[in-house]
Structure formats: structure tokens, C-alpha cells
Amino acid sequence: MKNAVGREIPESLLKNQWKEARGGKGYEVYQGRNYRDGTYIRKQGPRTAIGEKPQESKLLPSVREAVIKSGLKDGMTVSFHHHFRDGDYIVNMVMKEIVDLGIKDITIAASSLGSAHDPIADYIEQGIVTGIQTSGIRGRIGDVVSHGKLKTPAILRSHGGRVRAVEEGDVHIDVAFIGAPTSDEYGNARALGGKSDCGVLSYSAVDAQYADKVVVITDTLKPFPNFPASIHGIDVDYVVKVDEIGNPKKIASAAARMTQNPRDLMMAEATAKIMAATPWFRDGFSFQTGAGGPSLAVNRFIEPLMNERNIKMSWAVGGITGPICDLLRRGLVGTIVDTQDFDVAAIDDIRDNPNHYEISASEYANPANKGAFVNKLDFVILAALEVDVDFNVNVITGSDGVLRGAPGGHPDTAAGAKCCIIVTPLTRGRMATICEKVVTVTTPGECVDVVVTDYGVAVNPKRQDIIEYLDRAGIRHMPIKELQEKAYSMVGRPEELQWKDKVVAILEARDGTILDVVREIKPYSL
Amino acid sequence: MKNAVGREIPESLLKNQWKEARGGKGYEVYQGRNYRDGTYIRKQGPRTAIGEKPQESKLLPSVREAVIKSGLKDGMTVSFHHHFRDGDYIVNMVMKEIVDLGIKDITIAASSLGSAHDPIADYIEQGIVTGIQTSGIRGRIGDVVSHGKLKTPAILRSHGGRVRAVEEGDVHIDVAFIGAPTSDEYGNARALGGKSDCGVLSYSAVDAQYADKVVVITDTLKPFPNFPASIHGIDVDYVVKVDEIGNPKKIASAAARMTQNPRDLMMAEATAKIMAATPWFRDGFSFQTGAGGPSLAVNRFIEPLMNERNIKMSWAVGGITGPICDLLRRGLVGTIVDTQDFDVAAIDDIRDNPNHYEISASEYANPANKGAFVNKLDFVILAALEVDVDFNVNVITGSDGVLRGAPGGHPDTAAGAKCCIIVTPLTRGRMATICEKVVTVTTPGECVDVVVTDYGVAVNPKRQDIIEYLDRAGIRHMPIKELQEKAYSMVGRPEELQWKDKVVAILEARDGTILDVVREIKPYSL
């Protein structure tokens, strides 16, 4: 069945009801933006242990003991967060114990998985891990999934979509393992004050609330109560102290250095000018930008424009980096609301700055609550692996068709923001970024408003208002088809990828419908 | 059927399934402390509206409009918090609109009701309000309920028991009305920064999470995002701005003046000495005391004992007053965790002091989560209307049998604390406080460890450990029977109260079983 972005979704997926996916309800295909607005969600009611009798401590001597006590069994789902990013030790540490205990048919429901988790690829190949639900999928995991080694299709969700899925019961977490830079013996856990600080624990909030069992793993015990807590002890069954939960050097990059690449700077400047040409660039505007070179550089170019008009940003949201914290410190931003910290400067800032707040992933981006922060967002600046002539964006599959990306907050912010700007070079190496048809749709074109490249700007024809604003400001733009043709003229038309029939991954739209599927890649040798 | 505190509970109540009470499961009688420990609770899954499509504001022009939009209908349950105490305008304001709209058969599920809510008594008499679920019940409401005017028995719960009941579905809140000193247009609400600050919104947390519809009512709108928020916009459907949500003068008393009553001081000093004789009076101990004269004065007497031993309190919890905040500022207390503020000094302190934190009522006292703060409590000092020779405490019915009190956190802290001390004069006016049998059991005797009166101290024989500690410290104590006999010798044996058969109120134990019932009082004239 064809969905609202023109993708053919196999009927078998819509009927097929494996494991907990869609709570046995089966799937719908993507119907378009705001399809479920105003309808109702029946949230899940977790079954949790009653701790009526006072106990002094929930400390267990080892991760293995916690796995055993949690009642983890064959066929269950475990969850993790990705705040430790490439420095994460938790996923591998826990999975090793699960595998050593002979427990199998495990689904990993992580907020994201990355290169730190290559060992999981082995468990997939061995048939021990049979389900993956995540935002990011990269490295060896992406490889083995793309080559059809995972027993069930991986389910890929945006950050907001994950919260919705947990709340709605599309995925039921049996045991959540939450790595925490600090915790007390009752599980009041923080992302600050330890030796592996990650700033916030936003993605874990929903796991703590909805999992049957919750295990906090820390390397730094603090006296009770460890406040202000991101994860609350009332939701935690067990606490384990280990030597190291992560590698601090890989959790956050050093303070991001601003790009000096002239192409990036040019695109960033163009983006800032486009922002300034719209009516939303007014006192009190709100803003999110990514951590990539050109996106980050936008911070630098909006500052003089803000000063020129004597306006301030009310709030910034998202994955946070040093440059936006600088603007906060200089009084140009009122408040930062934070779901993830990309660099040391951002972690330092949330530690010290009273106007820099942690929010949960639900507050950030959940499409099924009563209004997330993304719903109030004026501008979001995003990157892309590919954008097609229908403005559909791909941030998950490489040009070889292999899984190596993450929807993250991309579809959430694009859907919510009044003005979503994609910044991307026209070509990367010998690949056209602006193309006829993206390999995989991760953000629907109807949510993308402007595309800024190093060869020109295109505005989604659905946004006649923005076209007018740019025209009025004398900012040149062109049909996106022209950008695509320019790209193809430079690097040639990309070869068609060769796929097998087997669906290896499902791209869920944030509302839980199917936006696209990824199929098993045919080896090059064929 | 007789329960574990020897009270006869009518069989009809155990089978009777009115409205939402016990989720249609019927009641059990009280089985004893920690009866449900280690069993499982299946939390309710609220049905809430999906706010996928961005909207700029949830503001409605009036409370009436919010009542209409919320879909409130005959037979529904509405909820309120009591952080504005005697200064609350919200309950009456909302109920007036409901009544004016002709909606009937309403259950009010408040965290507490007080003298500010006398007008509700009229709605009870008119048969419009047919159910009351609350902790406190006083003034005219207590009167009409005691005289059999409410259609269904009032259900009285502790603060922790209320959270459990909402989570478990014993009471389903259709619409929560949350008065908030400040809010933004999305419902991010705080208890500070307005003109009617109440310090915290702890009791409302569960309402916001579990009600189908949530309405925030404020008199002070703040720019978005109004952070750090106690109630999160993601849980809020509508926001209403009114002129005044409460009378600040009655929300919090002026800074509490320490009692000069020699009897109170003597009891407070005795209490402090008893605390100091136990092993829990060590560096890092935890403590809760009430706002009454002798309880409050304990703060003054423990200070020199702490200094003498060079020990500090790790944390204090509960309804908070100025004196404990003074100890925090002087470095004698590490952290205050706060569910309610009784005086202006406490509100000022949480506004300014980074070691003074708001916690939810679930974190405070819910017996069905994975471990509330009360479970880690060393000492709690509590008051009582009556204590009987089995150490059962009554804090709900007066000596005339009329409802005029509140279990509040009394049963929760008594059950959790290692050492629960009741401080009460032996007699009040011409009534014996220490009696043969309390009118109503609100805290079971098995949770009460020591009773301190102006005529001597009694220790629960179940606590042989404490008896030893006092003996070792040379602190005199006597059987509680002697205290009761002394009281009767002074003021005479109380006359038996005359009751009708009709049950007008059910005292739920914190675990949801029936601890006691209150029957309709026979008019004096009979």
C-alpha cells in the first residue's frame, strides 16, 4: 500500500504482528502530518513492585545480580539511553551478562545505538538479539541489520516517536538499564557530579516511568537524597555501582570549534539571512540547531542580526552545544531547554547556569502528549544525507543503502517548527545530496520548508508565505528540481541501489505509522 | 468483619461497589502494616488528548469555558490540591461554574478540604456533590457529612494513600483543576513567582499525570517556558487566567512563632531527649516534624543536642516551616525535601535556597511506589486528637464524633519512620487525649512507637529496642494504660458517643484497605 509520501509499504507488514510492535494492533501507513491530532491515546499502565516496607538500600553487588533479580527472561525487551554517546559502556556491559546467563531472544529498545555498540552485532548474528528498536543505527549493527541478520525488522523511531511508542505500548520495556553519572542507594540519579557526566538523562525519563523493572547503574554513589534527581528513586528497583559507566572523552566532544570551511560558513550565513527575512525572527523567537559544522555556524551569523534589530531569543532547545550556551551567557538567549549535550561546554553550562534546564524527551518532542516544545518552535536548522525534489529527507541510509544514521529529533522538530531549514552541500564526494528520490524517507517533505545548499536555496512550494518573505528581502531561490539537476550534472545520476525483498528496518513516523521501509541490501558482488 | 486494629467493618462495604471506589474491585479490611509489600500494582493508563498539531496557546477566557471544554458531565470526578490551604479560591470558583452549568452527581477528589470550602457543604445538601474523597475534612463539610447528608460515604486517605489510589484506579479523575501561582500559556506551572505563592505543587503531580483532562488556573501568566515547572505543560489541556487564585494571607501563616507555653516546651524537650537516646540520632539522621506548637518546638531542643555531639541532619521532609529552614541555613540540615509549606518563611526558603527541593506526594509517601522518602525516615514527631491504650491514633474525629481533621501524612510517616513519636497533652479541656479506645483509628497502633505527654512517656511494648534505649539513658516511661487512667482520673471517663448505623466516611489505610469507618452521629437532642 502506498503511503502519503509515495512509498510502497508491504501489506504483510501491516498485518504482521510480531512481538510487542504496535501492541498487536498492526500498522497503518503514514497518512500525513498531524494525522492523529485531537484523537486520544490510552497510555499503558505499568505493573511495578510495591515497596511499602522500608528498606535502607537498593544496592546490588553486580550487574549480573541485577539481571537475575530483575527477572529477565527469554523473549524480553531491555532498554538503554544514549546520553553517553560514543563513550557508553552500559549497553555492552549489561548485554554481556544477559548473554553469559544464556538468556536469548532479546529485543534492545534503546533511545539510540552507535559505534560504541559494535559487539551487539555479534549477538545479532548469533541470534541472541532478535529485535532492535532505536533511533540511531550505525557501525557494525547497521551493517548486519542491512544484510538481513536481525530476526525481526529493526524499528527506527524519532526521539519523540519513541516516547509515544513506549507510552502507547507499541514497545513494552521489561527491564530498563539506566546508566547514571551519579546515584544514591535508592536510585535518585543525576547526570552531573560524577566522573562521566553527560549533562542530562532526558531520554531515560520514559523508561523509568514505563518499564516493569528499572536498574540504575552508576560509577559514583552519592549520599541520599541525590537531588535534584533526573531519575527518581520511586521508579527504581535496583542500583548497581560499577567501576566505570563510560569513557568521558567520548561522551562529549571538547568544546566544538567553529567551522572555518568557507562553504559551511557561506551556507550558515545564507541560513541566518533567510531566518531574518521571516516574521518569526522577532524578539522572543525560539530556535534549535544541530551540532554539525554549518548548523553550528548559524549561531555565529544570527548574533549580529539579533543585535542589529535589538532582539533576543526567548529559548533554545535540543541537543545542546557550547555556542548556544555562549549566547545564553551573553544574555541573547533567555532559557535553554536541554535533552542532550554534545560537548563539554554544554555540560558545564547546565551544571552552572540556572537558566539552562533539563527536559524529558516527552517534553521535547513527543507527538502524543498535550504539546511538546517542538510545537512552539519558530526555527529549526537541520542537516541531511539526502533531500529529494519532494523535499523528503533521508538521514538514515547511506548512498550504499546501508543503515548508518539516526532520525533523532529531525522529524519531530521539522513537524513542529514554523520554519524548518535544511542545510546541506549540494554534493558530498561524488554523491548528489539533492536527488530525485531519497533512498529512505525519514522526514516527510511536507515538514521541510527551505533547503540551503552551497549552490542555492529552494523553498517548498507549499510554503508560499516563506517564498514571499524571501522575495521581499531579495533573497534568491530556485525550484529544488534545478538544484537536483545541477547536482546530477556535477556528479552524475546515482546508480539504482539493488535490494532484496526482505524488509530489514521499518521507519516509523513519529505518530507510529509506517513512513518507509529499508530492505536487505544486495551484496556488491551480485 | 473485624480488621487488624479490631474495628468492625460492615460486610456491605466490602461488597458494595459504588462509583469508582476500589476500581470496582471491592474492599478488603486492614490486614496490618506492609501487607502489600513486594506484591505488584498495575498502574492506570490515562486516556489523554493528542496534541500533535502545533498550537500557540492553551489559554481559555474563563473557568466556565474550561469546564465546558473539558467535557465535564454528570457523574464525573474533579480534583483539586490544598496548597492554598485556608486561602484557596479555586475549589469554590470551579464548583460554582459546575453547579451553574447544571452538572450534577459530582465527586470531589481533593488532596484536602478545609474551612475555605464551606460552600461545598451546600452542594452536598443539595445533592449535587455526591462523593468526597479527601484527606482533610473540616468545618461545614465535616458537619454535613457527619450528619449523613453526603450520598456516598466520604473516602478519607493519607497523602501517600491518595497517590496510590489514583495510580491504582481506585479513583479516576476526569478533570483536574490545578491552581497555580504562575503558569505560561502552555500550562507549565510553578508555585513561585506570583502573587499567591504556595511554595510547591506536590499534591497535584499525580493529578496532572492521571487525570483525563487537566486545567491550570492561575492569576499570574509568565512567558513560555515558565521553568523550572512543577506541573508540566505536556500534561495540561487548558490554561485559565483569573483575577485571584487565593488569599495570600491565608495561604501561609506569618513566620511561626515558637511556643512559649511551658507545657509544650516541656514535652518538646522530653521528645528531643528521647530522640537523642536512640541510635538513629547520629550524623546524617533524617527527620520530620509537624507545624503544631510542641512539635515545632522540638526543632529548638534538638539543636543543642546535635551541636553537643557534633552531628548534622542529612535531610528533613514534610510539611515545612521556618524553624527547619533556619537549621538548613545554619548548616545543621543538609537538604529539605518539601511537599507543603506552612509558613511564609518556608516559601521564602524554597524560593532562594538551592538545597530546599520540591518533591511530589508520591516521592513523599506513596506506599505503592518503589520506596518513598518516608521509608528512609529516622524520626517523625506527630500530634494526635486521641491515642488509645493500643497506641492507635485518631486525627480525624473530634470528641463529639464529628469529622474535623485530616490523616495527611500521619499514617504514612508513622508507617515508614524508624521511630514515630506522638506528642500530645494528656487532656485537652475536659477531654482525655489518652483513652481506652479512640473514636476513629487513623494511624494503626503498630506504627506508633512512643507517646510523650505532659504527665509522662509511654513506649509501645512492640518496641522493646526503644524501651531498652530509654532505660539505658535513664528516661522514665510508663505503661500507656497508666497514662489513660491518669487522664480519666483528671477529667472523668468520656461518655459513649451515640451513632446511627449509616457509614458516612471510610478511613482507608494507606494501602487501600479499610482501617475504620465513621458513622452518622446522633443529634445531641436524642
Image (cartoon, coloured by chain):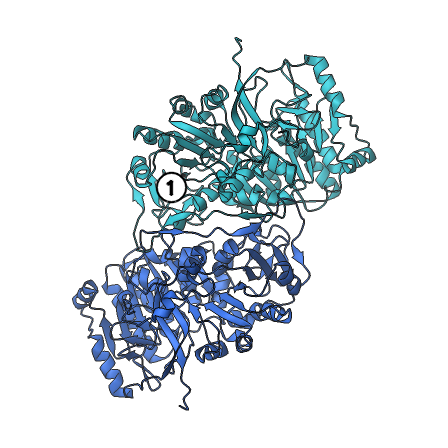
Chain colours: A blue, B cyan
Which residue extends farthest top?
B525
Identify whether A185 is placed above or below B387.
below
Q: Residue furthest bottom?
A: A525
Task: Residue A50: give x, y in percent of width and height.
Answer: 59, 47
Neighbours of disc 1 within 10 Å: few (<14), some (14-19), many (20+): many
Which one is in front, B194 or B368?
Answer: B368
Locate residue A512, reporting x and y percent.
37, 62
Give the residue at x 81% y 36%: B468
For residue A85, above or below residue A485: above
Point out the image quarter for the C terminus of chain A: bottom left
Q: Mark 1 points at which residue?
A: B216
The answer to whether residue A329 shows anywhere in this view is no
Q: Nearer the viewer, residue A60 or B83?
A: A60
Q: What element carries label 1?
A: strand
Q: Where is residue B485 in the image (x, y as percent from the top left)?
A: 74, 18
In the shown orientation, is residue A293 left or right of residue A255?
left
Q: Quadrant of residue A119?
A: bottom right
Give the amino acid type for the residue marked by disc 1 in the picture: Val
Labels in figure, total: 1
- Of B400 and B57, nearer the camera is B400
